[in-house]
Image (spheres, rainbow, N blue to C red):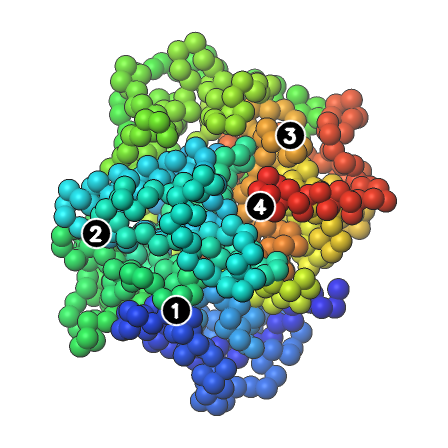
Amino acid sequence: MAEHQNTLGRIGDRVVKLCTSTETVSSLLAGEPDLAPADAWERLYGQHALKAAARDGAEDEDAATPEPGPVEADALQRAASCGKWGPTQPSELFLQIYHDALCTLNDSPVPAMVSPPLMGSCGVMPLTIISVVPDIVRHMSNVIVRAEREVFLATNYWQDSVASKFLTDAIRELDRRAGERGSRVVVKILYDRGSPKQLVEPHYIVSEKAFTGKNVKLPQPCEIPNIDMEVMNYHTPLLGTFHSKYMVVDRKIALLQSNNILDNDNLEMLVHLEGPIVDSLYDMALISWHKKLDPPLPSANSPAAQGGLGSWPSEKSNGSAVKEGSQQENGRVREPGVVDPSVPAASSDTTRADTLTGPSTTEGGTHPHPTQRQPTDVEATGGDEQKSSLRSQAPNGAVDGQAETYLAKGEQSIPQNQMQEPTPPDNPLPEHDSEDPHYDVDIAGEVARVQTAVSPKPHETRMQAVTRLLNHTVNKGFEGDAPESPPGEEMTPYIAHPAHEPFPMALVNRAPYGPPTHKSVSNPQNAAWISGLRHAKKSVFIQSPTLNAEPILPAIREACERGVDVYCYICLGYNDAGELLPKQGGHNEMVAHKLYESLSAAARQRLHYFWYVAKDMTRPLVQEHKKRSCHIKLMIVDERVGIQGNGNQDTQSWFHSQEINVMLDSAAVCRAWTDALRRNQNTHVYGALDQEQGMWLDGDGNEAEGVIGVDPGRFSWAKGVVGAIKRVQGTGGF
């Protein structure tokens, strides 16, 4: 355990100097488009550059040596100076976590996976998606076809599938639109499909024959004459998986999600980001690409904080505040991420779209229409009887009351009448699918279309509509068994956030690490997760497919013993076989059981552990059945600070994979997430583990069907070998 201790002290002088610098990888490439991002990184942060920074900054020798403890006011101020926060200032909790993340850069900025000046930023979040893969790629496809000059798409695993067809069709539609307006678009695609070539060259450009072949099936260049597409395969041998999943479009919009591009049964999560934070994700994308970009990205001179790429053919976006004085003589913007001070921080204009808010219309993500339906008897009474019925059908006739109280604090972002009737019943919007695309002009149109698709068709109940959505391409015909949801519990795949001022955000990433050891533990991602548990005063919510990383388990125990309620939503049986390999941490059942055993009687009541239960089910299903699984990666601390992205709470994500995560400081967004997490799954009703036994049992005292059990047995390693083979073959969990 000693090698896993994340020893944090104070932010070193060199880190402050790096974070307050005016130079980044993306700013260097703006001036030298032929420069490889790897060479730009070496110039800024190579050993010689770091030694010079240390001399100039008079680095304190003991900056990283003190044991972790309360973060003092001067240390918080030091952390605050290491970010560009826009019109709102970070909360104390956010700065405490950000401080601890920055401390991991004292030895080197490499773990950040972003240029340090862009690690702390601000932005807005018009949309969150909590749904199945088709709903995620629907939005991705809409953002792609609305692109003007460039698309940078990255995923861990790309497989020819219905999911990928949404995107390849969108690329073809983008080509058509580009041809109509007489422009060219640059598309970069980055994935990790294991190849022996990566033993010699971790980043290699994929041949046309390979990326148009049966496994990937991207468009052939002759199909998209107006697009310059380049594809890269990236993996750091042996275990440094490129586990990242994101998309950056026109340096205006960034999507950060949990899903890969393939068909499966997972519930997933995506956030849509705009504003200066997009510069941070753009910079990270360049660093991940590593090699010279051929051709370069058109947005090199158009940071998000200065408006990004403008609407074609103009080079200035709606509301852009780019001024001649903000550029150098050669046209290169001085500092990506820095907002022009002439842009007002606040405005009464609800349609505002400028360099702080990003390009999307911000008056709201919904298009309300006059409702034609009358409330049902159940709706008129508030659904109390149905809610009581749900509670009575939970295992042993009870649910976790504390969890119910916590989840009740969520706030829905879509008006109730629009959830129940998103479009006029006599003229419903057709579904946007892979065989019959229906692209929308804005987020509001997408929200209405998707909510229409999850609404009941004639002779269909609302829960049957949910089952239809969850079955999508992989489980057609599978039947759910959950009763109808009462009003206020409708599934809302797309969560449109009301207009809001930009709020503080930070990237908390980890760089890939290939060797089969657990030495790579000190990085912003891991520090942020541990710090969230350490500094929480009320609650920590965690949702992850797996939870077994050795460093997080004592942090959960300590939080519970300290009086903090910790809620863990974990997927039963997720990648169980692979997690049984030596040094992988063990499978979810074993870990949960041991956690409960290790707690005092009082602390045991503050650990609220659940197995994921799908919206249309009344019991958890083992992931091996591939019927109803969950792949969301999320932490919410004290209902205010959220960390969302790519990283699982497992050994692979903690010690090896490249992971990209955004930390945000917004109680409003966290409340909206809490509401959507409650209404888009039945985990809180049917998934609670018994707090005394540390196990899930049904009303008859039986475990879930097909589980391994809390004791995997003497030959668990053999099951682990099988699981590892499945992952390599692309059939296991990611």
Quick check: marks 2 and 1 in contact, CB under 8 Å? Answer: no
The answer to whether residue 434 is seen in the rendering is yes
* Residue carrying label 1: 37
Q: Residue at x 59, y 28 (%)?
A: 627
- Mark 4 neighbour class, 10 Å CA radius: few under 14, some 14 to 19, many 20 or more: some
Among the two numbered marks 1 and 4 on one chain, the one whose residue lies closer to the N terminus: 1
SS category of the residue bearing label 2: loop
Q: 37 left or right of 653?
A: left
- The residue where tag 3 is placed is 625
- Residue 734 is labelled as 4
Residue closer to the observer: 149 or 428? 149
Residue at the spot 36% in from the left edge and 66% down from the top edge: 292
Give coordinates of residue 242: x percent, y percent.
52, 55
Q: What amino acid is found at the position of numbered circle 4 in the picture?
A: Phe
Residue marked by disc 2: 184
**Number of residues whose C-alpha sits closer than 10 Å to that of mark 3, classed few (under 14), some (14–19) or many (20 or more):** few
Measured Cα–Cα span from mark 1 to mark 3: 43 Å
Given the current orientation, which residue lies at the most extreme front position?
A: 209
Between residues 526 and 141, which one lies in front from this camera angle?
Answer: 141
Give the amino acid type for the residue marked by disc 1 in the picture: Pro
How far across and how far down the image is residue 261, in percent? 46, 42
Q: Earlier in the sequence, mark 2 or mark 1?
A: 1
Instruction: Say what amino acid the circle numbered 3 marks.
Output: His
Task: Work out which quarter of the rendered image holds the N terminus and state it.
Answer: bottom right
